[in-house]
Image (cartoon, rainbow, N blue to C red):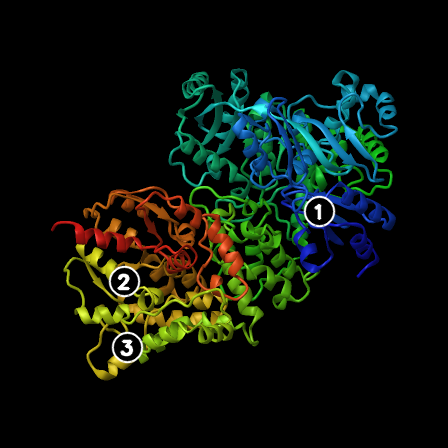
Amino acid sequence: MTDLEAALRRAVRGEVGFDVTSRALTTMDASNYRRVPFGVVAPRDADDVAAVLEVCRAHGTPVVARGGGTSIAGQATGTGVVLDFTRHMNRLVALDPEARTAVVQPGLVLDRLQEAAAPHGLRFGPDPSTHSRCTLGGMIGNNSCGSHSVAWGTTADSVRELSVLTARERPARLGPGWAGAPEGLRELVDGDLWRLRTGFPDLPRRISGYALDALLPENGADVARSFCGSEGTLGVLTEAVVRLVEAPRARALAVLGYADEAGAAEAAAGLLPLGPLTVEGMAVDLVPSTEGLPRGGAWLFVETGGDSEAQARAAAEAVVRAADDAVDALVVTDPAGQRALWRIREDASGTATRMPDGSEAWPGWEDCAVPPARLGGYLRDFRALLTAHGLRGTPYGHFGDGCIHVRIDFDLLTDAGVARFRRFSEELADVVVAHGGSLSGEHGDGQARAELLPRMYGEETVALFERAKGVWDPDDLLNPGMLVRPAPLDTNLRFSVLPREPVDVEFGYPSDGGDFSAAVRRCVGVAKCRTTSVTGSAVMCPSFRATGDEQHSTRGRARLLHEMLAGEVVTDGWRSPEVRDALDLCLSCKGCRSDCPVEVDMATYKAEFLHHHYEGRRRPPAHYAMGWLPVWLRWAARARVAPVVNALASVRPLAAVGKRLGGIAKERDVPRLSGETFSRWWRGRGGPVAEGELVVLWPDTFTEHLSPSVGRAAVRVLEAAGLRVVLPPTLRGRAAVGDGTSKSALALLAARRSRVCCGLTYVSTGQLDRARAVMRRTLDLMTPVLETSAPVVVLEPSCAAALRTDLPELLHDDPRAARLAARVLTFAQALERHAPDWTPPTVNLPATGQTHCHQHAVLGDAADRRLREAAGLTGELSGGCCGLAGNFGFEDGHYEVSVACAEDQLLPAVREAPDGAVVLADGFSCRTQLEQLGGVRGRHLAEVLAEGLEQRPE
């Protein structure tokens, strides 16, 4: 233990982390930069903050304040001690609806403040796209803005008073009239009034540098306002009094289509006199689908408000009439429709990190701002500069404020690429200044732009910034290297530490050119995985919501993998216990594959890591007990010992021993085996009975051995829809596609030894060699099916997802894998595509439950929604993950997190369901979790429809 660490542990009550994991998690924010801290402290209160400052000043160690870690310029990284305010200092202290103010701690997430203010008809004005995870302290440090700044301004416009501690532990209450100003600040301002009155561009989004002009007498000498945007370099915020604004009772959204981005940019300023709440712009490059949008190659999203829907709509229609240069327009008043459109805009910060061809793009010039009237001309010059440097980028953002976000395909991996990054940055800074703009219009200067501030302000004003920093922080203790005396913009790049050659891995990573490092680089740190609540069918990230710990977020795990590849902080490579422990609570729900804006696939990364981590070593017992579950269940079925196994499992002492040996949580009941497998039932019924279009029904392990009733119900429904149902072949070779039976005793013996399997349990436990062998055997068996046009219907969503994604990505060298993946359909998709004229039975019941996480992430549930609607099953299913997640919830040590995940969405939805509601759960894990934790029987949609068929007159 170092002297610094020991001194901090003695001085503070909060957590002190100098361990590998704590340091690795905070090496980066959402920028291109990386700095390794000595350690991390989570202070419990202002006294802890003062103690940290005292200890660090005595040791000459820098201090960096950090909120949600979503800063894009590098200012939330540091080489000293990082203060993490999100763990304890995250409360809403008070809210006064009459005064329209709130008292907040720096670690409070913006959405929590909005939720508390909403019942009073109030809100905090600024709302960055990261509102679900950014903190008020970070917003004050960066002077954040968001899409509503045309109406409610920047964070500085919403601050009334700030409680701060200076580097020498002096508490101060900052406000107007020089309140809280350190000694010497007033003299500094009085000595340079002319420069402060003439040297600062007049535009709504001037975030760069220190806001010293807020200290002018005519501006009220507002020390709190001047402190905003100082990026933690002047003092440490411990509490803030912020202003709230009245939220419109109703909103409407006018979406205006323009031929191109320049046309949208030039039109934006002309709409401001109409008093809109937002004027946001984006081009077609960033829109995954233009469905629901008006015609055009670029759009303005103009939000209006009113006391009623009619008033808001009228304001939006006035905007449409004023936009006579738009090629098309629509007005949306439905809240759900507006949310869907805004989601496109909010996800742009992540989707912009990939070019249309899949290549990488990066921040660095994320948010320059110019006067709104000059935005069109600036964008033309910006595009010309990109072309001159052979670069690509897609601008979007706050067109009404003249602020543009853009990710550019810089090559930050080679010396030549980094040199071009520097040249482009210098030349773009000159273009911004030529248009009267600010190098930063929202996210601050950090390391990305501070070096270039003399081009914007001149050397004398930057020298004044340095003097101001000296007044507040004479020891240069707070976030050194930011804003003044900055590190060069092309140093500390986070990619420089990664291996230059591709890492030897098992999966193909087709979207990343087969490069595991590129896959890990996908995480840019926007931290959508750190949200504490989900909406709709969203899933990501259930383990973070259960623990609140950064290492259990998708971003945290990606950071640890990054550091594992770098080898500086995490030094054990694939054998790293820190990475293993962080991945241990990953449920492999695949939610990040769809919910993460850049489609980080942590389930695959986890399987990859586990494969290498345990290669040549003994695995945890659960990997053998549950990873090899298909083998154990086949043996039990072949020996016809299901009743014996069930009887033994019901004897508590015997079950306890078995669970302990198998690494299964003692709180779990072992699921009962079916006395008759699905395949045995199938053979007994004599094979297919319908003569319609052929479909191959996949007998997954769970349906085969644990829930054969689901398979029987699916056969009943599919045949009622006029489809000819068969099972996959059980013999390798050229056998015709049939009913999965064989005639001779020898062939029957072979058939029993050759059953199709998706390999899911082996993949989820990282036994990739075994998974590959099982998958190749499956492809051999399925070869006759692939020679037909028959779809493959998979009832278990996790197995369907494994066939769709894990199979072709693990067997990327076998073309049959992609062909089989393309054939896989869910139960609802099969009915919709291959029996489009069939009418399901009318059930007419409310439905509750949860969309399976793998279905949400990989397969989609649109067909299921339509099928439920056709059957009269009303109500929405919840999102999230059930928490059992295959082997995860059964493994020893996972029970509490598993329960917390179930209590996040699934169990509350079931408890709140109306009487008589059908509890839908297509996944075996989901049904098991419902039964064991809620005492509720969940049912597959096929079972509900089959029961409806029984009750429907022929």
Q: Earlier in the sequence, mark 2 or mark 3?
A: 2
Kind of residue sitting beneath label 3: Ala
In front: label 2 or label 3:
2
- As drawn, the residue found furthest toward the front would be 652
Q: CA distance from mark 2 to mark 3?
A: 23 Å
Whether residue 284 is visible here, answered yes or no, is yes
Q: Residues within 10 Å of mark 2 (few under 14, many from 20)?
A: many
Q: Residues within 10 Å of mark 1 (few under 14, many from 20)?
A: many
Kind of residue sitting beneath label 2: Ser
Give the percent coordinates (x, y) of residue 393.
Answer: 55, 39
Residue under circle 3? 751
State the mark number for residue 585: none
Whether residue 78 is visible here, answered yes or no, is no
Q: Is residue 284 left or right of residue 690?
A: right
Residue under circle 1? 77
Q: Residues within 10 Å of mark 3 (few under 14, many from 20)?
A: some
Depth check: 710 or 668 in front? 668
Residue under circle 2? 709
Q: CA distance from mark 2 to mark 1?
A: 55 Å
Give the percent coordinates (x, y) of residue 774.
Answer: 40, 72
Q: Is residue 389 left or right of residue 632?
A: right
**SS at badge 1:** loop
Q: Earlier in the sequence, mark 3 or mark 1?
A: 1
**SS at badge 3:** helix
Q: Quadrant location of the N terminus?
A: bottom right
Q: Is residue 670 above or below residue 447?
A: below
Kind of residue sitting beneath label 1: Thr
